[in-house]
Image: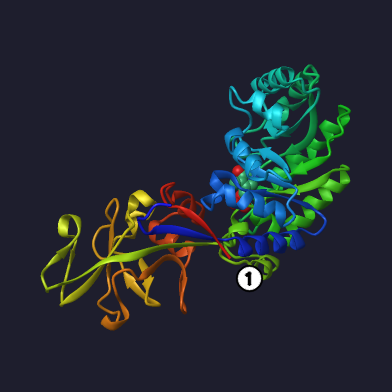
Amino acid sequence: MPTRPCWAEIDLAAFAHNLRLLQRTADASTLAATVKADAYGHSIALCAPAAVEAGASWLAVTSTDEALTAARACAEVVPRILVLSGPFPGDGEAVAAYGFTCSVWQREHLQELHGGALQCGRSELPVHLEIDTGMSRQGVAPEDQIEFLETLCTFPTLRLDGVMTHLYAADESDHAATQRQLKRLADSLCAVRERGFAPAWLSVGNSAALLDRDLRSQLAAMASRHGLRLLLRPGIALYGVPPEYDPQPPESAAASSAGLLPVLRWKTRVTSLRRIAPGEVVGYNGSFQATQPMRLALLAVGYADGLSRRLSHRGHALVAGLRAPYAGRISMDQAVLDVTGVPEERLRTGDEVVLLGRQGDSVVTAEDHARWAETIPWEIFTAIAARVPRIAAG
Ligand SMILES: *Cc1c(COP(=O)(O)O)cnc(C)c1O
């Protein structure tokens, strides 16, 4: 364990609570716990087995590399693992050896997976056909779908186990874009069945879709109309952050989201304390100048740890249960807090500082960081650098 005091505590009980809450919300549908990008920065090695223990039968990751990490972490009960970005060249053998389920939408994917299956002597490998219903990112275009399905039939090892798509605006409460996507998806499902395929799964829906009752019901109805089981793929909500709906959360989402618990606490310590006189400056380019006698606390965290440089002159952290603003520019490996407002007797070198999370009655959320850094909570979590150890906490 590194001795530099900058770490993230991962509350696995909160993670399991969120997963169970989402499972209750999803009712009879199945969840694929999305643990891509190192479980949104929360450590796939910690979160994948915790998800399985809490009842997840599927995990979703971005790549075969991540799937391998997840499978190894879940040594005892390996769940089904969905590889969302499709197989990359060279992935076939590992996918076939472990029986991962890749989304596929182009011939290269089929060749790669079929080749892998032959190499491993696996006679059957499940795949999920991804339909591009409007995001224009990945997936087969609806008009090319029939031809692709015919190509799929020429690869005898590959079995169509599911149909998937990704909703790009499930957080837009008017659902206009989503309804256009679902119309295309429904047409695709008809085409799949007309060609005589009988997949088991309809894989669609992120956190925003899951938490919105109307959308969730619509997806469940579509699945059941086509004799499919609905597989929802929540990510951000598992980590305790409700999706931000535009312009407003539907009532059903607000109710379920209220029970989500934050999972990650990002901490450091005060490594040094000093006083500066009025007129002295702090940090690179002296962008902060003391207007009064001030007290400063040095922290062992910087932008190389993922603490956005945009927090300079905006954000705050928690120390002694109080808010202390960042003073001057965040450096690569260090940041300085203005602790003038924290009573001197309540602060010592070595004290714990909460960058993200709760301390006493105060809290700094991922949403706060996202606002300060002008981004989204997803990026805040995944930006926390690999050198910040993730530690399981109760
Ligand atoms: C990341 C991702 C999800 C999860 O999205 P959240 O908004 O974090 O719930 C679901 N499906 C796909 C295809 C994804 O890439």
Instruction: Answer whether residue 23 is visible to the viewer in this image.
Output: yes
Residue type (three-letter) at the residue carrying disc 1: Ala
The residue positioned 54% from the left and 44% from the top of the image is: 37
Location of residue 92 (image quadrant) = top right
**353 on left or right of 162:** left
> Residue 209: which quarter of the image?
bottom right
Q: Is mark 1 within 8 Å of ligand 1?
A: no
Identity of the residue drawn at 15% across and 74% down: 291
Q: Which residue is mark 1?
A: 258
Q: Position of residue 69 (x, y in %)?
A: 59, 40
- Judge from the rendering whether residue 63 lies leftward or rightward of residue 268; answer left or right: right
Q: How many marks?
A: 1
Frontmost residue, 278 versus 52: 52
> In which quadrant of the rendered view does residue 108 lie?
top right
Question: What element does badge 1 sit on?
Answer: loop
Asked whether residue 169 appears in the rendered view, the answer is: no
Q: Quadrant of the C terminus?
A: bottom right
Residue placed most toward the observer, 113 or 142: 113
* Vertical arrangement, residue 34 with respect to residue 69, above or below: below
Residue closest to the eye, 81 or 169 = 81
